[in-house]
Image (cartoon, helix red, strand yellow):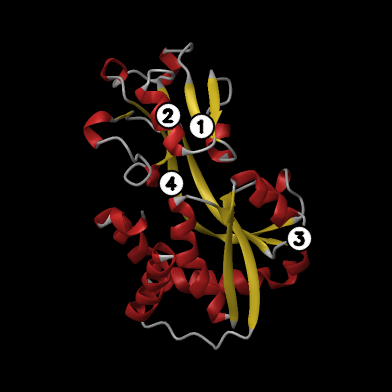
Amino acid sequence: MFRKRRKNWLILSWVFLCGLSFQASAEQWTLSAVQNSTLTQISQAIIIPAYAELGISVQISEFPPMRALRYSNNGLVDGELFRIRGIEAQYPNLTPVPVPLFTGDIIAFTMDPALADTPISETPDARVLIRRGVISAELATRGMNREVVDTYEQMISMLQAGRAQYGVFSRVHTSISLRGATLDDVYILAEPLSHFELLHYVHEKHADRVEDIAAALQFVHDSGLTEQILQALEDNPELFE
């Protein structure tokens, strides 16, 4: 409960500091999102004020990654908080909002100092861990000897036990999700595996609202709020734990 209150307080604080004037929210939408993800916390801090500009109050419901997609694609909620560009090819009931939330990298790390400077491509038999339902990581590791885990905590435990050699994260997770390991234990490979762009998606029943949502999201970006959020993550990652 405290974590939820702190998240809401952070969002309201950023809105206040940016001086954004929002309309009173009369309409209520629910968006599905990936649970236990820093990207969810960042994305909702961008999306909530954007929707408020349109007079829409947003509730975020967090689920395991694939369940979140099923719910949004089936119209059980109004949309998906964030996914990589192109997900609509697999989930055709989702309509992308064309203004990106933000971009980032998919990176690999190891806890074995002997592999600290060794790209995965040079160790084809190495076991690579990715989190279930993180499609950007799935795409970046195609053809690798990979194993899917349910949580990042499980990933860390397996690496510490020597049951795998590499883990894969989005860049923004490196300071947040490596709980149970100090940064001295972690060696991040220099070259990213891939670059990704995150978009917000709505169910096709709301396709006629996409243009307005895109304009509101662009307004939030132009206001400087997105930059403040990302800078806050870099300066104070503990805020997003």
Element marked by disc 3: loop
**Foreground residue among 153 and 111:** 153
* Residue at numbered disc 2: 167
Relative to residue 187, is residue 1 drawn left or right?
Answer: right
Q: Is residue 139 above or below residue 42?
A: above
Question: Which sits earlier in the primary sequence, circle 2 or circle 3?
Answer: 3
Mark 2 vs mark 3, CA separation in Å: 33 Å
Disc marking residue 59: none
Residue to which mark 1 is pinned:
130
x, y (%) of residue 119? 38, 20
Residue 238 to residue 2: above or below:
above
Q: Earlier in the sequence, mark 3 or mark 4?
A: 3
Q: Are marks 4 and 1 in contact (CB under 8 Å)?
A: no
Q: Position of residue 70 (x, y in %)?
A: 71, 50
Q: Is residue 95 left or right of residue 234?
A: right
In this figure, which residue is indicated by the disc labeled 4?
104
Q: Write down the residue under mark 3.
A: 75
The residue tagged with tag 1: helix, strand or loop? Answer: strand
Q: CA distance from mark 4 to mark 1?
A: 17 Å
Q: Nearer the viewer, mark 3 or mark 4?
A: 3
Q: Quadrant of residue 204?
A: bottom right
Element under disc 2: strand
Residue type indicated by callout 1: Ile
- Name which residue type carries label 4: Gly
